[in-house]
Image (spheres, rainbow, N blue to C red):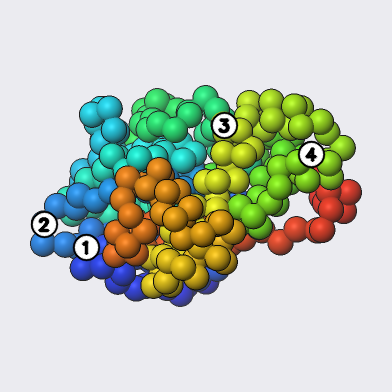
Amino acid sequence: MSTAVRQRVVTPVWQVMRPARPSRLPGVVLAGLRDRGPAPVDHRLDPHPVLTLALVCGEAALGIDEPTGRRHRGSLVTGLGFGVGGAARVRAANVEWIQVRLSPAIARTVLGVGPAELESSVVVLDDLWGERRAARLRERLAQAASWEERFALVEAFLARLSAAGPAIEPELAWAWDRIVAGHGQVRVEGLADELGWSRKRLWSRFHAQLGLPPKRAVKLVRFDWAATRLAGGQEAARVAADCGYADQSHLHRDVMAFTGVTPAAVARQSLVATADMAWVDHVPRLPARWGDAPAAV
């Protein structure tokens, strides 16, 4: 990797570091976060069309509270779309951690379980990778001399896992990438037709391997794109029109359903609380039709 790491402070609370180049692993995006606020962090988690790994560097506390009241501490993974309704919270105090955004198309190869098994929940990584492996990674991240070294450690670790893990069907990986590339403005029926599958076959396999029905996935990706633009300062009326909503009221209902707050409240959130950490910066570039697509993720 290049020795340059991009930095910027997006709020008084988080300092954010980004690698100088995208990850070599398709469907993986890395960022480093450092909590430097005067008080412990406590903010809402919004749902994203990714699985998110939080890899703590050292012994400082990082936690996520589920809407059920259940609390998780340490290095964690949140499932696809976790945080719907706005009741999930992230809490931290003087913590440094690597955030890994995983496409659900490659999550099984890295985690050993698919998005459907995780559902929209939180799991401690010790339970997935084993206490010894997770502790060793945490120690190495704490001992690393720079964020650049941390990024390299995580990328190498994920590469070893993905080389041994099982993949999903390439047709489903392609369908997911088409949904993301289209920012959720994709007809599910059109995807089935391009694949030469029945709608029932696409629904059942997509749901089983990616963890969401395809139409729900479309809505989640569209919401994520809209929320990111709202947080970036664009007016709600323009966001509604550009993101394929019928009108501004439709956008309002969708944002409320996903976050529990209004579009205006989403616009006031830092981008760290929406999708700043990378999804919109790394939209897959795809051939126009399935028949021209590569045969693997």
Asked if residue 80 is positioned above or below residue 92 in the image, the reply reads: above
What residue lies at 56% left-to-right and 61% top-to-bottom? 243
Along the line of sight, which residue is nearer the eye, 236 or 148?
236
* Image coords of residue 98 (percent x, y): 38, 52
User: What mark, if any, has residue 13 been given in the picture?
Assistant: 1
Element type where label 1 sits in the image: loop
Gap in angstroms between the C-alphas marked 4 and 3: 17 Å
What residue lies at 71% left-to-right and 61% top-to-bottom? 285
N-terminal-most mark, 1 or 4: 1
Question: What amino acid is labelled 2 in the image?
Answer: Ala
Along the line of sight, which residue is nearer the eye, 34 or 277?
277
Give the left or right position of residue 289, taking residue 73 as reference.
right
Classed neighbour count for the residue bearing mark 3: other residues with Cα under 10 Å, few (<14), some (14–19), many (≥20):
many
Element type where label 4 sits in the image: helix
Residue linked to disc 4: 192
User: What mark, if any, has residue 211 been given in the picture?
Assistant: 3
Residue linked to disc 2: 39
**Which residue appears farthest toward the left when viewing the image?**
38
Give the left or right position of residue 76, taking residue 214 as reference.
left
The answer to whether mark 1 and mark 4 are in CB contact below 8 A is: no
Disc 4 vs disc 2: which is toward the camera? Answer: 4
Disc 1 vs disc 4: which is toward the camera? Answer: 4
Question: What amino acid is labelled 3 in the image?
Answer: Gly
